[in-house]
Amino acid sequence: MNDQVTTLGSAGYGVSQQERNRVLRNTYWLLALSLLPTVLGAWLGVATGITRSLSGGLGLIVFLGGAFGFMYVIEKTKHSSAGVAVLLAFTFFMGLMLSRMIGMVLGFKNGSELIMTAFAGTAGVFLVMASLATVIKRDLSGMGKFLFVGVLVLFVGSIINVFIGSTAGMMAISVAAIGIFSAYMLYDLKQIIDGGETNYISATLALYLDLFNVFQSLLALLGIMGGERD
């Protein structure tokens, strides 16, 4: 009975319940595993200061070049076990890139508390979105186009602000990013649950990027608004 292919409402995805559950389970396991290289990369970056010089345009070039390069390779290897290894290498790279911001936040007297607050806030957003994804019955696939446009606008704004260095701009971008990537989290989870995404490596990558951006934006916002100097 579980192997029977079912069509889901207006989504029209012909994927069995068993297959959807398998993809969701594997995605959650790989997502949890991907946090370990991220933490290791962030720790290494803070400990060695290897990313300290990556500021302004140089940091943006290294980040975008590395991120898009990894994502291209992940897409090419997502149907093999090599895709898992590349994904974990990508999350290590993202941890390294995050270490510069973490190092700056740790410079505050309450830096450790701000990091834990950002982590708890991100976990809370994920739990809320995961719960909503299981109870919402309507097809959310149409959200994808609007969210993609939102990300493009956010991306352009972030690049401009790298060179302007506006604190108010950084706050506005962070608030917008939290909202957009929280909605993207709901969209990506619903895609897995409805059978729209059947590759767990691609699903993990999408959710990881959602979580990473929410955490980074929360951390930036907390650092700007709640950072206490000695």
Image (cartoon, rainbow, N blue to C red):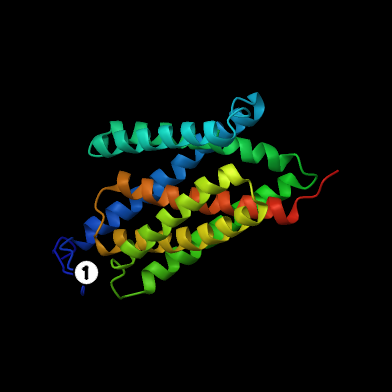
Where residue 78 sits in the image (x, y, percent)?
26, 39
Residue designated by label 1: 11
Q: Is residue 185 left or right of residue 77?
A: right
Q: Return the residue nearer the eye: 184 or 149.
A: 149
- The amino acid at mark 1 is Ala
Q: Is residue 205 left or right of residue 225?
A: left
Where residue 159 sits in the image (x, y, percent)?
50, 45
Identify the residue at image location x=36%, y=58%: 148
Identify the residue at image location x=64%, y=24%: 48
* Figure quadrant of residue 105: top right
Q: Is residue 11 left or right of residue 33?
A: left
Q: Return the residue nearer the eye: 211 or 50.
A: 50
- For the N terminus, the image quarter is bottom left
Q: Is residue 205 left or right of residue 173?
A: left
Q: Secondary structure at mark 1?
A: loop
- Where 176 sits versus 207, above or below? below
